[in-house]
Amino acid sequence: MRAGGNLVLLPRVPYLDERLRPCTLLDELFPARPVALPADEPGAGRGAAGHAVRLCTGAQVVVAGQVDTFELAAESEALAWAGQERRPCAYRRPYGSGTATLLGFALAARPTETAEHERFIASLADRAMVRRHAFSEVPGLHVVERATPPGSARPAGYLFVVNPLPRPVRSRLSYTHPASGAPMRLPRLLQGVEFAGAGALILCLEVPIPGSGLTIAYCTSQVQGWDVEEGRLRLSLYGQPQTKGELAVRLRPGREPPAAGAGQWQHVRDGADELWILCYEHLPGETLLHLQA
């Protein structure tokens, strides 16, 4: 913490250690002790449901159980408010080079408010300047990045993207470049990775295609496989039907982009980053891209 860590606790500060002995280790981090809401206020009292909490994101959500409020010192920043008098029920304070955050309520709400809770959690990370390796710009779309170990001879990675709900969603994704570690975003031309309903995709990052002179910088479709034969490349891709996909490749020095049938490559340069990008429609089942050198 003193060296720059960020701690978030909810809904109460622990007061016992792993052997159930009294422990005051966290008292210095969280000096503002809870003051429960008056029992006559709607939703007050342990185990009561339906208490409204206003978050720093501007959203109001319903939480279950006890809600603690706090008398805050000047150095503390309120993050949520409860009760008719809008008393702080969550706060963040500096500690050394890091921060300590306490939420006086449990993140339990109606299923329709899940996205608001995710926005709130993301705002906590942003306020603490925590860099996430991969995330979606739209709450509800879950993203995890996995990459080769640092220093690998051929750095590459994958994004595991899940839409758990039966509704359309489209979002750009932020991720970490497997080689440079720099923050990146995809796609560049389309408005986002697209799902027509619930589903999951595994997206490859910086994956070379042997014998082709091409490296897949990213693809918003799941790459099922490829064939390279006599200067022809066939890519087998998957994406939900009635959605669009985007393929971005890097070329070997001196190589021209491959012909793509009815499609047309777009050249995108961003500083030292140079990509050739192709957009296409996903077909039912398997989508095949035939590229001619």
Image: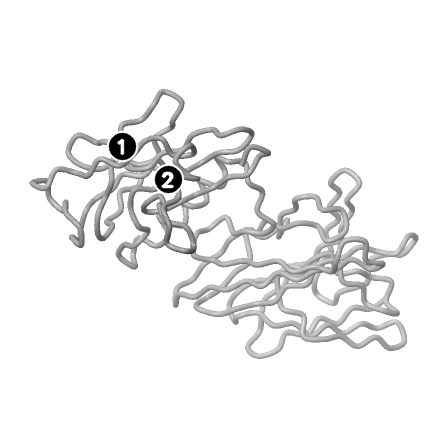
Q: Residue furthest left?
A: 40
Above or below, comparing residue 273 to residue 18 in the picture: above
Above or below, comparing residue 8 to residue 127 in the picture: below
The answer to which of 138 and 147 lies nearer the viewer is 147
Left or right: 170 with respect to 152? left
Q: Where's residue 262, x and y in %? A: 70, 65
Q: Residue at x 15, y 52 (%)?
A: 48
Q: Are marks 1 and 2 in contact (CB under 8 Å)?
A: yes
Q: Residue at x 79, y 60 (%)?
A: 215
Between the C-alphas of marks 1 and 2, the distance is: 10 Å
Q: Residue furthest right?
A: 254
Quadrant into which the C terminus falls: bottom right
Q: Looking at the rendering, which quadrant does residue 31 occupy? A: top left
The residue where tag 1 is placed is: 70
Q: Where's residue 160, x and y in %? A: 58, 63
The residue where tag 2 is placed is: 102
- Reading the chain from its start, which is encountered first: label 1 or label 2? 1
- Amino acid type of the residue tagged 2 in the rendering: Leu
Q: Residues within 10 Å of mark 1 (few under 14, many from 20)?
A: many
Q: Residue at x 19, y 47 (%)?
A: 51
Q: Secondary structure at mark 2?
A: strand
